Image (cartoon, rainbow, N blue to C red):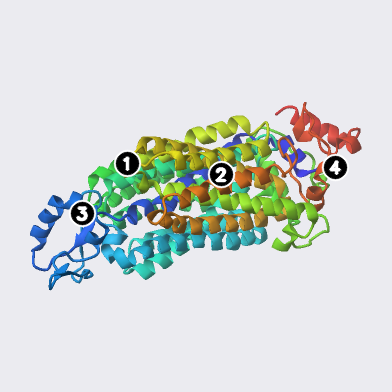
Amino acid sequence: MNFDQILSAVGGFGKYQKILYIWICLPQILLAFHMMVSIFTGSTPPHHCRDSSISVAGNQSHFLGTLSLNFSLSDSSCFSSDDLLESNRTERVPCSQGWVYSKETFQSTTVTEWDLVCNKAGLNSLGSSIYMFGLLVGSVLFGAMADRYGRRFILLLSIALQTGFGVAVAFAPNFSVYVILRFLVGTTVSGVIINAFVLGTEWTCTKRRMLAGIFTDYAFGLGYMLLAGIAYLIRDWRKLQLAISAPGFLLIFYIWWENSMSICTLNPLCIEYMNTLFVIHILSSALISGNFRCLCPLFLVSLLSLSTVMLSLSPVRVLPQSARWLLANDRMEEAIALLRKAALVNGRVLPPAVQVEKCQILDGGKRSYSAMDLVRTPQMRKRTIILFYIWFVNVLVYYGLSLGVSKLGTNLYLTQFVFGLIEIPARSLVLLVLPFSRRLSQSGFLAVGGLACLLMLAVPADHPNVLTGLAMVGKFGITASFAVIYVYTAEIFPTVLRQTGIGVSCMFARIGGVLAPIINMLHDHSLTTPLVIFGISPLLGAILGLALPETADRPLPDTVEDAENWDMRSPPNKDNPEMSEDTSQSANSKEQQELRRLASQA
């Protein structure tokens, strides 16, 4: 008897799991804010040297009048026009009085505040790379910590730290402090991403577990689109950073337990108190921004956060621990209590405790596992290396296209919104094709993303609409591939190494994120180099992906031996795939018959 069978008996995708997904999805909206906000806060507006001989007011009018002429020349924004001619010869003199920036699109950005232009322009991309490096560190750190201390504790810790550091970024006194704080935000973002996904996966039955990754991706896409609207209304980078970080404080209700929820349910004043906090948050955010037009998007964001509070009044504990992880760590009583709670909420019956005690998770008692176990055995080693590369490629191309949106030559806010919108149909298509094959879906979407990038090489630069269309196709393909890889990876790695495997996979993925801004910088020197890299690397990943095993409708492997003997395991039962494993050995037992009867009622 394995855990998938027990989970199916108590309800593998009932009310308990659906409410859990909502709690998991809400922080994903805030993750999208932090991941993409640098597109706006780090944008470089048109600029030219400040002329000491002209007043600021006159400089601004001169700026508007010569904008189209001056900024067609690369030297005009970095060298003073007054000093270009000396003694009848041309001499390039760097700006000595600073720069004047256009405020047509942005009131302020990190670039305008700290003059990250000309010889300091590389610092802007360096800041983005350091943020991505934070995601790399976080994926390793929080992944290993979650395997040791549990998914729930590390997820709550990551949310709290993300909110604190995110607010602190808005008050950074200089660029160095700003980069350090953004690095810390990046580490916590990884902690939320991987632990939220794994927590949902481990509470979901075999047939429905792919929804854990797809649903959270929908929430990320929603945050992607909301950010465009919030940034459109808040043009100051500090106020924008504060507006996207402050709603995280409302997620403090995630730490509540059942007793607190019961008290709140019986006390109407508690609900009134939460509504008051809701109104205070909206008004304070508007006052901070100095722009009451921001009330609309902030209202939507705060409403989503408040829904977390209202959901906490349900009979389900906010963010429960993973019962699968508890069993794997020999914490039987806690696991049984959670399974009994899930069965009650789902209107099901938990099998007798003796059946749960016979559930086999670990091979070797309390043996501890490390990242080295991912490559210790032949089959695990092959699959691990392929998965690491696919993760690397997905993040490299995904953020290469996303962060390079300003190079498409269209309205930044509208393009950002469309790039977020296109993620919805991409992930919807994944929901349709993923039940048939994980392997073919992964390779197919990678191929689409890579081919679209290569086709952009054949389009002349004077056809921006065609280039934008192909960029959308590439974003569509790589987004769908990104959605698949989360589900696929969680199904290939065994329970005892799942969190560590996903954590190390995210580490390799973030290497791609670190390289994406650097590769985009090559666009200034060679228009084709970034596209060649973004095109060939996914095609190679598509080929390698065909060597991975098919996991559709197969029980999750719990041990390394399960993963090594994948091809020898029983094929899925078409009538009831959730109960297919080990049926030949225990079909006549009363325990197995009871589990089958309970699962058939799902």
Q: Report helix, strand or loop for mark 2.
A: helix
Disc number placed over residue 568 in the picture, else none: 4
Please state which amino acid type lies under the numbered disc 2.
Answer: Phe
User: Which is in the foreground here, disc 3 or disc 4?
Assistant: 3
Q: Residue 441 sits in which quadrant?
A: top right
Task: Report the Cα–Cα distance between label 2 and label 3.
Answer: 37 Å
User: Which is in the foreground here, disc 1 or disc 3?
Assistant: 1
Disc number placed over residue 521 in the picture, else none: none
Q: Which residue is mark 2?
A: 482
Q: Which of disc 3 and disc 1 is earlier in sequence?
A: 3
Circles 2 and 1, Cβ within 8 Å, touching? The answer is no
Task: Report the Cα–Cα distance between label 4 and label 2.
Answer: 29 Å
Task: Report the Cα–Cα distance between label 1 and label 4.
Answer: 54 Å
Task: Report the Cα–Cα distance between label 3 and label 4.
Answer: 66 Å
Task: Report the Cα–Cα distance between label 1 and label 3.
Answer: 17 Å
- Which of these two is toward me, 463 or 550? 463
Q: Which of disc 3 and disc 2 is earlier in sequence?
A: 3
